[in-house]
């Protein structure tokens, strides 16, 4: 089994003791069990992040609007997301009579599968990654396209004109903004020399001037293009027209109630986390601890996870902040922004990175100035 | 029952055919160890299939705008 | 062992998806089953050691072609009405013209002879089930694309440009009805 976390844990004493207890030929079974345990831990942690994301959004928006957020359920209102979850669990599961049953059922599953499939390659630390695929970032792009299909099918299956329009707009927004995001990722991949996420993170250092963000001016612009494109891909922040229709008229998840709607909402909040995690792995230095604390010891791994999580949550805060600050874009402004501004800028970025690589042989601007 | 009359269903069948041939090429590449030509050919099959699906669907949309139907028997103007 | 499980699951998904594409009534369902079949084929690429190709299949097909098909179905009427004007006779399975039968029989003959010959030769030459070290294919594909197959690479870029412009021009809404 080619899993990074199993490979990392296999250098410890307890692993070999366990293996000696079970017998030497049970190595695949033992690695499978450990892998499944780590998968469960990661799924639980990410679902918790998704739930707490709803809570964080309400608290942060309340803070910006000079009011209290939820503060009744649990200390500081922390258990609010549990209360919401229980409420959604207990709601009646309605299916419209003329809706397409098969597609109505699997649309939220596509959204959730697309998001959960990406956590297999997220680089939480150098040892605590589920698997370091050779084509990691490419796989991540492919699997997160399933979310667009889920949005479209959700709009279609509800069999109402408004949700169909919302679904088509949402899906066309997602597939349009995949293009500047993919071109920017291509520029980073060229700089790092590989598609695997470990390679991409290890091409950066720990100090802030070693990050890809400050490597050259094209990477600087690229980070913002990636961030804007990723915001639009998650149907979030100033680009939430498919959902805003749900506030005004209806949207692609209007006919969904109870647990199915919870799937859509959970998928959205976890996708924001995944997108912020990819942004930190690609541009903000990933899991490298500043000043190299901890080293290779397990303490170092824990510090790496903490660093990665703090950078990701800082970006998460920026995402929530942007949503409650900026007004919403119209759909034609959205498409104009993507096709007439972001895509040409991303292409020029790519060409600029190629020229930079050729001229400076991959050194950063700090290395050029300070020798 | 296996003969579909919807043009888009025909395009879905074409995608299946192209995928099957691409899978074949990758299998050949595996059994000639070290020779990557099969995978490169499959890559180009994927590229060509995507381009052909795009153009084919554009034609279908135009056909629908003119004829208001996507039944293959309505595309019989050149027949005869 | 995991390779075998992956192979069985992917093969089942690919074949079942393909069969359901052919046999399903509703075209939206057929698109979903095609998606399942394409994901199964991506899994089969993984068992054959073509990791870059599997990821490409996911990105291009799942993220591009299937969404394109779904949009086209929506823009051409939604596929709600039964789109097959078939008479009662055509509902008997495999009822096609005799020409189809003759051609398919000949193709089956050729195919079975070829496959049988290959099978025999492969079984002779396939002595040991060896665990090849895992080599990523990305580097070798990239090198080959710009050295040995550079002509096909450049021509495919022109092809994609042509497809892009062509599809956009062909599907443009009719402007003659507007104020001109």
Image (cartoon, helix red, strand yellow):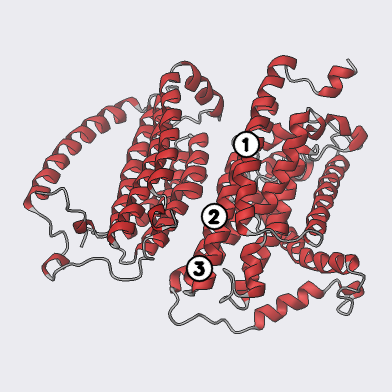
Q: Position of residue A294 (x, y in %)?
A: 90, 37
Q: Position of residue A90 (x, y in %)?
A: 66, 83
Label 1 sits on residue: A344
Q: Is residue A230 visible?
A: yes
Mark 1 Cα-neighbour bin, 10 Å: few <14, some 14–19, many ≥20: few
Closer to us: C158 or A31: C158
Mark 2 Cα-neighbour bin, 10 Å: few <14, some 14–19, many ≥20: many
Q: How many marks?
A: 3
Say if A322 sits above or below A19 in the image: below
Q: Is residue A269 shown left or right of residue B77? A: right
Q: Residue at x 12, y 44 (%)?
A: C105
Look at the image and tell me in which quarter the C terminus of chain A lies.
Answer: top right
Q: Residue at x 90, y 66 (%)?
A: A63
Q: Is residue A43 visible?
A: no
Look at the image and tell me in which quarter the N terminus of chain A lies.
Answer: top right
Label 2 sits on residue: A172
Q: Residue at x 60, y 84 (%)?
A: A92
Q: Quadrant of residue A79?
A: bottom right
Name the disc covering residue A164, or none: 3
Chain at numbered mark 3: A
Discs 2 and 3 share one subunit:
yes
Q: Position of residue C92 (x, y in %)?
A: 14, 66
Closer to us: A15 or A162: A162
Q: Is residue C58 shown left or right of residue C128? A: right
Discs 3 and 1 share one subunit:
yes
Sooner in the amino-acid sequence: mark 1 or mark 2: 2
Sooner in the amino-acid sequence: mark 2 or mark 3: 3
Sooner in the amino-acid sequence: mark 3 or mark 1: 3
As helix, strand or loop, the secondary structure at mark 2 comes to helix
Q: Position of residue C85 (x, y in %)?
A: 20, 67
Chain at numbered mark 1: A
Chain at numbered mark 2: A
């Amino acid at each position: 089994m080619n899993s990074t976390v199993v490979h990392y844990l296999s250098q410890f004493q307890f692993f070999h003791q366990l293996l000696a207890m079970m017998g030497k030929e049970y190595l695949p079974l033992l690695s499978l069990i450990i892998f499944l345990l780590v998968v469960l831990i990661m799924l639980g942690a990410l679902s918790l992040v998704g739930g707490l994301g709803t809570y964080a959004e309400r608290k942060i928006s309340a803070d910006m609007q000079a009011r209290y957020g939820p503060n009744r359920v649990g200390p500081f209102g922390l258990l609010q997301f549990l209360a919401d979850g229980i409420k959604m669990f207990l709601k009646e599961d309605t299916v419209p009579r003329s809706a397409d049953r098969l597609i109505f059922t699997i649309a939220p599953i596509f959204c959730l599968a697309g998001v959960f499939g990406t956590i297999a390659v997220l680089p939480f630390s150098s040892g605590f990654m589920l698997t370091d695929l050779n084509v990691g970032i490419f796989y991540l792009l492919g699997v997160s396209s399933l979310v667009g299909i889920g949005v479209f099918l959700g709009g279609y299956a509800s069999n109402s004109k408004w949700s169909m329009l919302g679904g088509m707009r949402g899906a066309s927004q997602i597939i349009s903004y995949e293009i500047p995001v993919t071109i920017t990722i291509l520029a980073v991949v060229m700089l790092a020399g590989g598609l695997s996420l470990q390679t991409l993170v290890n091409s950066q250092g720990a100090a802030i001037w070693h990050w890809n963000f400050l490597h050259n001016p094209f990477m600087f612009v690229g980070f913002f293009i990636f961030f804007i494109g990723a915001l639009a891909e998650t149907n979030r922040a100033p680009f939430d027209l498919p959902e805003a229709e749900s506030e005004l008229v209806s949207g692609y998840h209007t006919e969904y109630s109870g647990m199915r709607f919870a799937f859509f909402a959970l998928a959205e909040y976890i996708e924001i986390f995944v997108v912020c995690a990819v942004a930190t792995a690609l541009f903000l230095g990933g899991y490298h601890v500043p000043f190299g604390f901890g080293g290779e010891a397990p303490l170092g791994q824990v510090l790496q996870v903490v660093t990665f999580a703090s950078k990701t949550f800082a970006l998460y805060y920026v995402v929530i902040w942007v949503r409650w600050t900026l007004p919403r874009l119209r759909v034609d402004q959205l498409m104009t922004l993507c096709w007439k501004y972001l895509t040409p800028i991303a292409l020029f970025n790519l060409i600029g990175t190629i020229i930079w690589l050729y001229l400076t042989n991959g050194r950063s601007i700090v290395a050029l100035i300070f020798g | 029952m296996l003969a579909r009359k919807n043009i888009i269903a025909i395009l879905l069948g074409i995608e299946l055919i192209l995928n099957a041939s691409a899978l074949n090429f990758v299998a050949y590449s595996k059994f000639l160890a070290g020779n990557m030509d099969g995978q490169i050919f499959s890559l180009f099959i994927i590229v060509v299939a995507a381009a052909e699906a795009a153009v084919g669907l554009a034609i279908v949309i135009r056909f629908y705008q003119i004829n208001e139907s996507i039944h293959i028997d309505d595309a019989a103007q050149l027949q005869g | 062992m995991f390779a075998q499980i992956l192979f069985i699951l992917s093969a089942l998904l690919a074949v079942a998806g393909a069969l359901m594409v052919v046999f399903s009534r509703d075209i939206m369902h057929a698109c979903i089953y095609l998606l399942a079949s394409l994901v199964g084929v991506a899994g089969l690429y993984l068992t054959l050691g073509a990791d870059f190709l599997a990821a490409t299949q996911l990105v291009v097909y799942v993220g591009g072609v299937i969404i394109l098909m779904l949009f086209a179905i929506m823009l051409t009427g939604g596929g709600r009405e039964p789109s097959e004007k078939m008479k009662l006779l055509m509902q008997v399975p495999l009822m096609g013209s005799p020409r189809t039968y003759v051609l398919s029989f000949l193709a089956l003959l050729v195919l079975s002879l070829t496959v049988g010959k290959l099978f025999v030769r492969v079984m002779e030459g396939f002595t040991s089930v060896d665990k090849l070290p895992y080599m990523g294919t990305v580097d070798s594909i990239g090198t080959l694309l710009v050295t040995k197959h550079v002509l096909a690479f450049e021509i495919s870029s022109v092809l994609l440009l042509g497809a892009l412009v062509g599809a956009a021009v062909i599907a443009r809404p009719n402007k003659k009805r507007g104020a001109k």
